[in-house]
Amino acid sequence: MLTESKPPAGPPALPPSGPVWQSADALVAWCDARLAAAETRLAALPKATKRTVANTLDTVNALYAELDAAGGMASLMFSVHPDKTVRDAANGCTEKVERLDSRIKTDRAVYDAVAAVDIGKADAHTRRYVERLLREFRRAGVDKDEPTRQRIKAIHEELVKLSQEYRKNVSEDVRHIDITGGIEKLKGLPEDYLKAHAPKDGKIRITTDYPDFYPFQTYVEDGALRKALYQQFLSRGDPKNKPLLEKVLALRHELATTLGHATWAAYQAEDKMVKNAKTIAGFLDDLEKILRPKLEKDVAQVLARKKQDDPKADAFREWDRFYYVGKVREQKFDFDARAVRPYFSYPKVEQGILDLYSELFGLKFVRLKSEPVWHADVKAFGLEQDGKLIGKFYLDMHPRADKFKHAAQFGLETGIAGERIPVASLVCNFADPKVGDGKALMEHGEVTTFFHEFGHLVHHLLAQRTRWVALNGTACEWDFVEAPSQLLEEWAWDVDVLQRFAKHVDTGEAIPAALVKKMRAAEEFGKGVDVMRQLFYASYSFHVHSRDPAKLTLETFTAEMYKKYSPFPQTEGTHIYANFEHLIGYSSMYYTYQWSLAHAKDIFTRFQKEGIQNPKTARAYREAILEPGGAEDAAELVKRFLGRPFSLDAYKAWLEAE
Ligand SMILES: [Zn+2]
């Protein structure tokens, strides 16, 4: 029998002759060393009859710490590295990590070993760790017989292929409309757009790509043209994607029922904050009821504006959304988004956000100038508290060729109490002070995004309380993970906060309170329409996964969803099921955006009472919600911070506010 001992050390890490991203070879060698270390742990899981925390749980934890590091690095390097060979190597690493992860999760011997550990006297974190781990294994089908496990594996592989094909069909299906009759048909569009779309052989071609599509929907006065392009936009992927989606739905249903759930939506809900499908259905119903009156008010205003152009107009249509909501905003609030840009120069915004977060959460951000980075633009920082380094992060904030195009936080390493500090990176595409006139002006929406992503970053860095890697960082329930970042967006709308750093790039004058007020009022308008559209997506994604796909007809289902949840009637000749890509990635869980937001609004009520810049409140928030990460149920954390259980009231008040 084995005695209790520390798990054996894995193979030694590569000698640190340089950063792991210095070349494709270095990355591959580093990744393989991490995986080999994980394999060594796996092989070391002793065939003992007496299972202990030390000989079993610590080993599994160490194994996952290796996978966490390899997966985090690979995912970041794939998104940011300037060299294609390194990006390809990163992609290869991700595949290896996923393969090993799935092999472990379906390994009955590992499951039995973990299940056999006596945790009767263990602390709460250890018990939670084991419960979550065993649930994950069961959700992967580890306790099924061999033929069933093989079938589950085949379904997973088939789903990966179908998903890739669905996405590819959408991205490759670029449609267009050809407009004849000259440039005057495009009345309303800005000069630069017109210049980029000069007529060829008497025709102006507009495609369904975003840079063409959104300005066209926002500015073109001719409603018939907006409609024609919208129809093309919502037909992308058709007809190829319909049979693919039907197959995806059938396979997901088979997988869910094999694993003992009534539907895919129920299976997906099990390990989320909502816990079951009924809670989601109830939340969507509540939302619909709250939203209906607000939507009607918005639509009445938009329709009145539409009637000024077309006295016979009798409905607000899908292709009117951006155009007329924008018109009302312009008319009612006299707000031009361009007016705030001179106050948001990137370097000032970055400094402002660092200063604010450091004050609020009692942290110190120290620039690490000699730390190696993967591109000259990237800045490394240490996170210090009471003179101690407790985390590290990178800011990769400006666009360049072959870089990830959106804004996101990447966890590089999750912290482990007493053993490993957390590391993360922000990857964004904000204006670069080294380019053009050097002013690097940002849209207010981008400033909000910065606050949002930094919210994810501090969550990842501060949640390092336990020794269990799977409970730290942003390991809270998946449908809560946006709440801390959505909460911090509130700071981007506060006059006092903005005036700390939003100084005019030429005059140095702080952003005027009146301008912020106007900006907020304009932003508030159209919430009924916007959130109803979100509800439509959420309901579509949930309900399409809540029934037996054998009895589902996508056309009938789509018509039903439009009738019940859409802010406007369905547009003839469109096929949203062929291009709604979140059905692939989020599957049944699009509700998470609004669910998280409802929690963020509720958490914010305490800041509203005690002061948005009150460091005591911020510290309490840090301790109650950020630091625990996934160590407790999110509902418990929210309750602790608010002193009462979560309530929809704040979200409701926000939706109803004018
Ligand atoms: Zn986010």
Image (cartoon, rainbow, N blue to C red):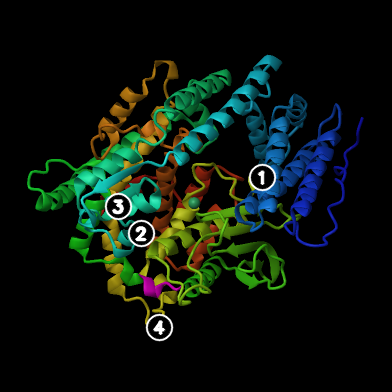
Q: Please give the residue where the numbered disc 4 appears in the rendered image.
A: 508
Q: Secondary structure at mark 2?
A: helix
Q: Residue at x 42, y 34 (%)?
A: 237
Which residues make up the magenta segment? Answer: 341-345
Mark 1 residue's CB less than 8 Å from ligand 1: no
Q: Main secondary structure of the magenta part?
A: helix
What's the distance in space between the residues labelled 1 and 3, CA to CA?
36 Å
x then y, percent, for residue 48: 86, 29
Q: Residues within 10 Å of mark 1 (few under 14, many from 20)?
A: some
x then y, percent, for residue 59: 80, 40
Whether pointer 1 and pointer 3 mark residues with C-beta atoms closer than 8 Å, the reply is no
- Give the residue at the far bottom of this rendering: 507
- Residue 265 versus residue 28 in the image, above or below: above
N-terminal-most mark, 4 or 2: 2
Q: Report the front residue among 567 and 212.
A: 212
Q: Please give the residue where the numbered disc 1 appears in the rendered image.
A: 91
Q: Please give the residue where the numbered disc 3 appears in the rendered image.
A: 216
N-terminal-most mark, 1 or 2: 1
Q: Residues within 10 Å of mark 2 (few under 14, many from 20)?
A: few
Q: Amino acid at mark 4?
A: Gly
Q: Please give the residue where the numbered disc 2 appears in the rendered image.
A: 196
